[in-house]
Amino acid sequence: MNSVLNTFVDIFREPSVIIGLIALLGLVLQRKSLSDTLKGTIKAFVGFLVLAAGAGVVSDALTPFGEMFQHAFGVQGVVPNNEAIVGKVLTDYGSQAALIFFFGMVVNVLLARFTRFKFIYMSGHVALYLAAMIAVILIANGFSTWQAILWGALAQGLVTTLSPALVQPWMRRVTKQDNVALGHTGNFGIATSGLVGKLAGDTSKSTEDLKIPKNLGFLRDTTVVIAVSMGVIYLLVTVIAGAGYVEEKLSGGQWYLLWSVMQAGKFSAGVFIILAGVRVVLAEIIPAFKGISEKLVPNAKPALDVPIVFTFAPNAVLVGFLASFVGGLIGMGVLVAVGGTIIIPGIVAHFMTGAASGVIGNATGGRRGAVLGAMTNGLMITFLPLLVLPFLGDVGLANSTFSDADFGVAGFLLGSAVRWGHTAVIVLILASLAAVLVGSAVAGRREAAKAEAEAGAGAGAEAEAGAGADAGAEGASRSAG
């Protein structure tokens, strides 16, 4: 049993495999030729591996920066990092988390099939992280294994179905279409960025329209802009941290300034690879997903990881990352001033969710929206982790925690219900499920009634126009007579 379970976990925790299987299923359902099916499946699979490789390069470049930042400014505290905290959780709650993850995916597909929330959550890695958080909150607070799996899977399915729906109104502005969604555990913060951009921004001035002097024309290239900007940041923090620390702890003896420039270059290279992978995945997965939409889940939309939006506003990616990081620094300053637990900015989280927040904020509010929206996201992923820490049991004593906004919101709601008792958790989950089903049904009836009224109005207009034409013809005939 454990070997079978481990096999399923190995398969479904790999987003590239999920993407490949989804592409394969969609192409088969469309009855594509063997050649087209193989080509589409392999390109979707490899495209996501390219994307993941780029994300790995970015993460490798950012991880030592976080350590150097802590040393340079003498700050100690909790670092939000999903990979670090999930490693510890899966050691203690791996089987339960895996089952919550698997059955949560089933709930997501069923909700997409039978409600108006047509989003299939395809970011398997962050979905597994979400399952891990749900598992530790429920089990650490007294739920038995089967109870945790049952209610945890329902909770997971609800979050992964509703989370993309929060961002979709803004995604339509970014992509100018409605055929792809955003599937990530930072969606609550990213959606908030879109709202902030709409309320406080100015769409007439986009980050992509920045006027660059002719002698700085090289900065029109996104790769160059990212390399130069990150180079300045890396060099500044490296100098403050000192040559001794960097060369002894981080660079393996390499000259600290050269190491700093190399890290900035690696970061830029990682972003370049991500963008290349995104283009391949979008080119293959959207047409393939048409088969699933038509046959299994009508009008379904794939909810893909945050890099999927990077190609739509490359300048906003950098602006959003920097603004989110500034928001994290401001939040950290507030926590230092008031005392208590300090949340140190997690660089990877600020890049991934901050960059996406910048793109969304730019779409709804231009440059100002990108800056203010991403900064709001940075503040959220600084303070929200504090709300989850009390519910994580012994795991909460570690020097890391879950980083993204969805973890904070879902974890706080679930943890708060746990404090009221097991019944409160069950009521919360069932009430949320009922609200989704009833709300979907009501919205469906209203839309059907609206469509029927519009059709009736159109038919009436046509009949009136026809009667007018008949009357005109009759009048003309009488005049001729």
Image (cartoon, rainbow, N blue to C red):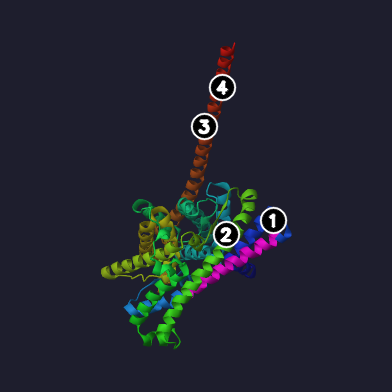
Residue 416 in the image: state x and y as whole percent: 39, 58
Between disc 2 and disc 1, the foreground one is 2
Name the N-terminal-most of marks 2 and 3. 2
Name the one closer to the observer, 146 or 317.
Answer: 317
Name the N-terminal-most of marks 4 and 1. 1
* Kind of residue at disc 3: Ala
- Examine the rendering and report whether any part of residue 414 can be seen: no
Name the one closer to the observer, 403 or 284.
Answer: 284
* Kind of residue at disc 2: Leu
**Is 82 on the left-hand or right-hand side of 237?**
right
Vertical relation: 308 (above or below) 474: below
From the image, tell me which residue sits under label 2. Answer: 282
Measured in 3D between alpha carbons, the distance from the residue under mark 2 to the one under mark 3, in whole angstroms, is 37 Å
Name the one closer to the observer, 316 or 132.
Answer: 316
Measured in 3D between alpha carbons, the distance from the residue under mark 3 to the one under mark 1, in whole angstroms, is 38 Å
What's the residue at 50%, 50% (across, down)? 433
- Magenta range: 36-60
Between disc 2 and disc 3, the foreground one is 2
* Kind of residue at disc 1: Val
Callout 4: 10 Å neighbours few (<14), some, many (20+)?
Answer: few
From the image, tell me which residue sits under label 4. Answer: 469
Q: Find numbered disc 4 in the image and state the secondary structure of the residue it sits on.
A: helix
Residue 18 in the image: state x and y as whole percent: 60, 62
Q: Is residue 52 magenta?
A: yes
From the image, tell me which residue sits under label 1. Answer: 28
Residue 60 in the image: state x and y as whole percent: 48, 76
**What mark, if any, has residue 453 been given in the picture?**
3
